[in-house]
Amino acid sequence: MTETTHTQTTPPEAAGRPRSPEFRLVVDALRGLRQDLFHGAFAYRPMPRMAVDGPLTRHLTGRAREYASWTPHALVAAAGVVAVLAEAASLSEGRATQLVSAFLVLVPVLLTLARPVGAFWLSLAATAVTSAVGDSWSSWPWLPGSFVSHLVVLTVVAIRTRPRTAAWMWLLTTLYGVWSVTVFGGDHYDTDAAPMSILSALILLAVTVRHTRREARQEVTAQQTVTEHERSRRTLLEERTTIARELHDVVAHHMSVVAIQAEAAPYRVENPPPELEKAFATIRENAVAALTELRRVLGVVRAENYEAPDAPQPTLADLDGLLANVRGAGLEVEKAVTGAVRELPQGVELSAYRIAQEALSNTLRHAPGASARVEIGYVLGGLGLRVVNGPPPAPHLIKASPGAGHGVTGMRERVSMLNGEMTAAPTAEGGYEVTVFLPVPTATGTEDEA
């Protein structure tokens, strides 16, 4: 007995059939219509209060400031009152009809404060009712009050929603006007469907332009924030790369000295024991291995066109040359040294030199014509450095150069690397002060009297 397996296949044209671009466009449009005007149409969305940090409202205080935040709500209510007055002036019937028409004109406007999309649908429905109960033959299908009310509703809803919703509201309003005139407007002398379509298009276009400009401004602000963050991050990385290069040169120099001294030490001792020769050989091998590894790891931070300096990295002993250089550039600077001058680790001296260099450069850029003072304090357990400048004389021929604070970022990075402390802030006299403390173990170096 043979079993037969039946496989049911779906015609290729029924499943997986590619859709035309026009069909997808219509489907997307209908999906957008449902999302904008049908889904959650009567959801509660109260109008937020106005911010009071504008050029005029920021000066208000107390209750006046609180009342000012309700300005948008008051404007909407005032527009509703105008629509009611226009409706009452166009009707000549009894008081009951006028009250009903006024109610139908006012409610959609007020509803925009809480349920904006629902207010649009209510305004269309109220327009049909007021045109049915009214006796005004001067316009159709919008009576004067309904005309004003619907324009206010379109404007407020467009401001509170997005441009696509405004486009849908305009399209439905135009279709409603065309349908009303075609079906029921044959006996009327005039129609305001065309004025409503044109005027609402202009208003909604203005609101859309306002939306677009605000979104563009927000996007530009966000991009500027990201750009500034990336610029600061790049500056920090560049500063760290510079520090790594300098420390690479410092450490490589010291490791080379260790390797050379370890290799030459056995020849300075007559008949050295084998254990001593072996120990020096081990020291040299470890120094060479450490130097090789250091160059391999830290060498990646070098730029392609970077060349190691021929001279050693600067220290505090070279500070006089730096001061002479800035004096030649027109900066009056004094130097004061306190405490017992001693040799510090080269990384500490290099960082102190670079910090003083950057602080003096900032003085030249941001306070041209001002005087500066560099104070170095050799204290127990560390090195203190203070660079302070006075305010620039006014008026001065050279304008200050604006900066982004990247120099201060680099100084902080160097201090943080050495577990130090730093403050940088304006002084009470109008100048600027940079104070740094770099910790140094007390056993380091040999202290000499100043």
Image (cartoon, rainbow, N blue to C red):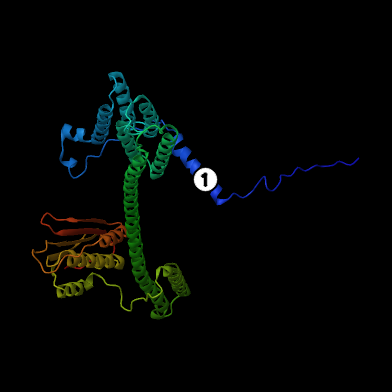
Question: On the rendered structure, is 385 left or right of 428?
Answer: right
Q: Residue placed at 34% from the left, 38% from the top?
A: 192
Q: Tell me where residue 181 sits by quadrant.
A: top left
Residue 338 in view, yes or no? no
Between 76 and 145, which is closer to the camera in this rendering? 145
- The picture places residue 51, in percent across and down from the top left corner, at 25, 39
| Residue lying farthest to the right in this orientation | 1
- Say which of 422 and 27 sits in front: 27
Q: What amino acid does circle 1 point to?
A: Val
* In the foreground, 274 or 182: 182
Task: Identify the image quadrant of the N terminus.
Answer: top right
Q: Please, is residue 221 above or below residue 267 in the view?
A: above
Q: Quadrant of residue 228?
A: bottom left
Name the residue rendered at 28%, 61% in the picture: 406
User: How many residues crowd around disc 1 within 10 Å: few (fewer than 14), some, or many (20 or more)?
Assistant: few
Identify the secondary structure beneath mark 1. Answer: helix
Instruction: Using the rendered image of the protein, determine whether residue 152 is visible from the camera's viewpoint.
Output: yes
Q: Classify residue 392 as left or right of residue 201.
A: left
- Percent position of residue 152, x then y: 31, 36
Residue at x 40% of width, y 77% of height? 260
> Label 1, on which residue?
26
Q: Does 311 sit left or right of 41 as displayed?
A: left
Query: How far across and down, in percent of the image, does residue 450 sit?
Result: 16, 68
User: x, y percentage for residue 117?
Assistant: 39, 34
Along the viewing direction, whichever of 80 and 444 lies nearer the viewer: 80
- The answer to whether 128 is drawn above or below residue 332 in the figure is above
Report the label total: 1
